[in-house]
């Protein structure tokens, strides 16, 4: 009998995965993302994923949509991040509350036929093998400079934050949680997703914080956690 492993290897990843296009939502490897599923096709998507690999591919629409109703099957970016279902709850009003843990980014090779209304695609994992391995820490000077900039950003936007939790987090957790949690645009979040490694993601994030510090219109009184 093979020993069950919670951690996945590159060879464990399937060739075809379900796609969940979601506007302005970012999932990164090793991070957790709570989701609320209620649309019929995505309830089917969840059941299908749960009965197979427990993997769902999160991906952003490349179109500028005000709502999902504008286009039920919008154009999407080529690169997304696959999440592994680590928790779920069926509610009394027929929804699924689920939690995905980011596994690895992927690149869409081509979409295949719909299944019960939800999109699927053949994907390439090869370019993102390192997502499944440990990450080298950023330089201490990078961390210190980033935290100082983050304090200015949050203060300027009048945003509350748990600094004890921030200071206790690892470099990877901090950079990724800020990337996922801040109210950046689709394009900006896609740039964070496609950054080659943690060091490059930090550079992108620093640039976005600089821009936000200089222009915070419509961003007041947000809560960051």
Image (spheres, rainbow, N blue to C red):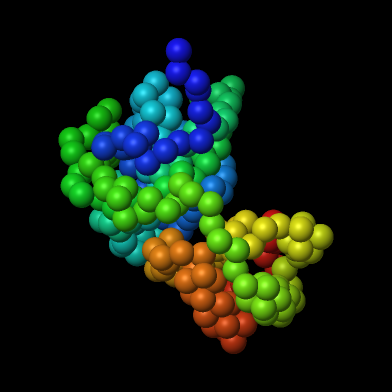
Residue 161: in sight, yes or no? yes
The tally of labels here is 0
Q: Position of residue 98 (x, y in %)?
A: 54, 34
Residue at image coords 62%, 56%? 173
For residue 146, side relative to residue 47 (left or right): right
Q: In the rendered view, would you say 54 is above or below 130?
A: above
For residue 92, side relative to residue 189 (left or right): right
Spot the residue most to the top. Answer: 1
For residue 162, side relative to residue 57 (left or right): right
Spot the residue most to the right. Answer: 164
Residue at image coords 73%, 61%? 166
Spot the residue most to the bottom. Answer: 214
Residue at image coords 48%, 49%? 133
Q: Nearer the viewer, residue 211 or 7?
A: 7
Residue 33: in sight, yes or no? no
Corner quadrant of residue 140: bottom right
Q: Position of residue 3 (x, y in %)?
A: 50, 21
Q: Quadrant of the C terminus?
A: bottom right
Q: Nearer the viewer, residue 23 or 79?
A: 79
Q: Nearer the viewer, residue 64 or 11?
A: 11
Residue at image coords 35%, 64%? 64
Corner quadrant of residue 53: top left
Corner quadrant of residue 191: bottom left
Q: In the rendered view, would you say 7 is above or below 192?
A: above
Q: In the rendered view, would you say 99 is above or below 158?
A: above
Q: Position of residue 19 (x, y in %)?
A: 33, 42
Q: Quadrant of the N terminus?
A: top left
């Amino acid at each position: 009998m093979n020993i069950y492993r919670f951690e996945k290897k590159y060879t464990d990843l399937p060739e075809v995965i379900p796609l969940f296009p979601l506007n302005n939502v970012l999932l990164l490897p090793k991070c957790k993302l709570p989701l609320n599923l209620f649309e019929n096709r995505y309830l089917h998507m969840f059941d299908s994923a749960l009965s197979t690999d427990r993997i769902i591919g999160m991906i952003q629409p490349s179109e500028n949509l005000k709502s999902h109703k504008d286009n039920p099957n919008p154009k999407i970016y080529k690169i997304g991040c696959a999440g592994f279902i680590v928790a779920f709850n069926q509610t009394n009003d027929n929804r699924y509350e689920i939690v995905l843990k980011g596994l690895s980014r992927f690149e869409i090779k081509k979409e295949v036929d719909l299944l019960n209304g939800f999109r699927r695609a053949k994907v390439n994992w090869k370019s993102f093998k390192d997502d499944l391995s440990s990450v080298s820490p950023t330089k201490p000077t990078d961390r210190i400079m980033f935290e100082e900039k983050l304090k200015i950003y949050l203060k300027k936007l009048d945003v509350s934050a748990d600094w004890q939790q921030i200071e206790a987090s690892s470099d990877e957790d901090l950079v990724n949680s800020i990337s996922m949690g801040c109210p950046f645009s689709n394009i900006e979040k896609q740039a964070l997703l496609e950054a080659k490694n943690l060091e490059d993601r930090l550079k992108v994030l620093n640039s976005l914080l600089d821009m936000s510090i200089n222009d915070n219109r419509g961003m007041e009184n947000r809560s960051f956690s």
